Image (cartoon, rainbow, N blue to C red):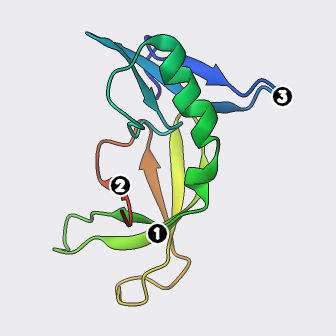
Amino acid sequence: MIPEHWSPHHREEDGEVLGYLRPEPGGHVPLTPFGHPVTGPLPEAEARAALDNLGLSYLAGPWLLTLPHREEPITVRILEVTPERMRVANADYGYEAADIGHVFVLDVPEPGRLRAAGP
C-alpha cells in the first residue's frame, strides 16, 4: 500500500497518476506508481517535471525481477499497477520454472526486487 506521506502526481490532461513524490531531506524523490525512484531528491517542481517527462513510458520496457531461489533475475513486463499491488508477466525464455506469460503479483511499493533492464 502506498504510504500516506507520498504525494500523488497526476497527469494534467486526464488525471492519470504518473507517480508519487516522497519527501526527503533535500527535496522530493519522484517515484513510479509502484515506488521505483526516477531520480534522487529534487525541488518539488523539478520532481513533478521528471514524472511528467517519464509519463507512463516505464510500462513499455522490460524489467528484471529478482527471485529468492534464483541467482540471476528474470525478464518481466509490467501488466498492471494499483496502489496495493502490481502484476508482471514472465518474458524470460531462459526461466524454465514458469511459462512465458506467467504472472507474478508483487506488493506496492515494490521493495527492490524489480529494476529496469538495460542502461
Residue at image position (42%, 36%) is 35
Residue 94: percent from the left, percent from the top?
35, 90
Q: Nearer the viewer, residue 116 or 65?
A: 116
Q: Quadrant of residue 82?
A: top right
Q: Using residue 101 as the reference point, say whether residue 119 is left or right of it.
A: left
Q: Quadrant of residue 92?
A: bottom left
Residue of label 3: 13
Residue of label 1: 76
Q: Using residue 71 as the reference point, say whether residue 18 is left or right of it.
A: right
Relative to 89, say whether 2 is above or below: above
Q: Amino acid at mark 3?
A: Glu
Is disc 1 in contact with disc 2, using a CB cutoff of under 8 Å?
yes
Q: Earlier in the sequence, mark 3 or mark 1?
A: 3
Is disc 3 in contact with disc 1, using a CB cutoff of under 8 Å?
no
Of tags 3 and 1, which is closer to the observer?
3
Residue 114's tag is 2
Tag 3's secondary structure?
loop
Q: CA distance from mark 3 to mark 1?
A: 29 Å
Q: Amino acid at mark 1?
A: Val
Is disc 3 in contact with disc 2, using a CB cutoff of under 8 Å?
no
Q: CA distance from mark 3 to mark 2?
A: 29 Å
Residue 39: percent from the left, percent from the top?
37, 34
Q: Earlier in the sequence, mark 1 or mark 2?
A: 1
Relative to 38, say whether 94 is above or below: below
Q: Amino acid at mark 2?
A: Leu
